[in-house]
Image (cartoon, rainbow, N blue to C red):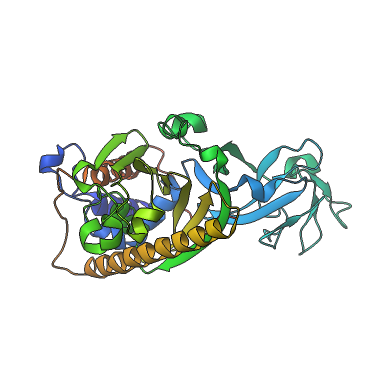
Amino acid sequence: MNAVEKNLLVEKLAGFDSQLDLERASTIPRLWYVDDLVHAAEREVVFGDSWLLACRIDEVADPGSYVTLEIAGEPLLIIRDVEDLQLRALSNVCRHRAAKVATCASGVATKLRCHYHGWTYDTKGQLKAVPEFGGVCDFSQQDNSLPEWSLDTWGPYVFVRAPGASRSEPLVEFLKPLPSLCSGLGIEKMKFVERKEYLLNCNWKVFVDNYLDGCYHCNTIHPALAGAIDYIHYRTECDSNTVVQISPLKPLDGSEVGALRKGRDAYYTWIWPNMMFNIYEGLMDINVVLPLGPNRCRVIFDFFFEDTDGPDQQAMIEQSLELAHKVQLEDAAICEEVYAGLQSATFNTGRFSVRRESGVYHFHQLLAKKLQTFTTEDDFRVIKDFHLCEAPG
């Protein structure tokens, strides 16, 4: 990024004061949602500098099993080594001419052979075979291994973090308070059932804003779901990289939603920057939102249930998935409407509901800290020409 572009980005990031009390604060400006340069900066310092959900552990359970994805603009390969059985997150870019080492979405392999020129790596990412490379001076196979990302697991998922990320805390610290919150909710008993994906014509932050608004939109956008939620006692707790929304659930009232969303409380937990864990009694869904540009995003839901046996339970699961789909369509419609409104020159920022929207402001404060710190660094990093961010798994 040259000096002109840097100054332009600094100017575009102005106009948001993250130090104000919630009572006096306003949202990030509309430009943060629609601008290409802001989007490129996010890909570098938001998605390229955090622990990110990559895939489910069950997808890479067997020796040599792998999944490919793009995350933070980088093609990645999550693979279980055939020798030591360790999980590794490797760059899916051959060190010769930058073709993909693995081209399938998933599979099982004892070695990784680039389909372009046949360079071959083992499942640790070490270069093992280089066809017709005799006579090349100052070349070392040991120096041409596939770059490796940090990797850790929690719950049913694999998480990754880019090499060179400024954040250094272990995953369990990054996720706090989610691990302790979930310790008594039985998520270890949940079984994966189905994945659903949605493409939305909106900026990824619009989707996060909607998720974090303290159910402010529930009565108007989700009337069926609102009937099961104790809106009066709904509360939001902001802490470090997370926002936890907790809602008591109303006693069973004979409604379909009440029968499908049971238990004492519902827990809706967002983890910076793009992960959401929604936990009820006996079921949970986990979703991520991935940017595909300033004006598009992909939302991915994984659904888990504790009890999956028998026709009655299967019928309940089908009804629960139908309810989740209906809610997501309602969210998608309002998010796309909001993004269309953000194109208007008559809108710049909005105010927050003090009672409901502390989670949205917390998200905006974290975002501003990352972006505004980025633009004031002495060693200002070059923003990469990012590829589209593809679905995990």
Q: Quadrant of residue 190?
A: top right
Q: Residue at x 54, y 46 (%)?
A: 306
The quadrant where residue 86 appears = top right
User: Seen from this angle, which residue lies furthest left?
Assistant: 24
Residue 29 percent location from the top left of the image: 21, 55
Residue 60 visible, this orientation: yes
Q: Nearer the viewer, residue 85 or 27?
A: 85
Q: In this view of the protein, which residue sits in the foreground, 147 or 132?
A: 147
Could you say where residue 97 lies in the image, as x and y percent from the top left?
Answer: 70, 59
Q: Residue at x 71, y 58 (%)?
A: 102
Q: Nearest the camera: 271 or 367?
A: 271
As drawn, 304 above or below 85 = below
Q: In front: 23, or 354?
A: 354
Q: Position of residue 275 (x, y in %)?
A: 43, 47
Q: Which residue occupies 78% across, 39% down?
A: 142
Q: Is residue 240 left or right of residue 92?
A: left
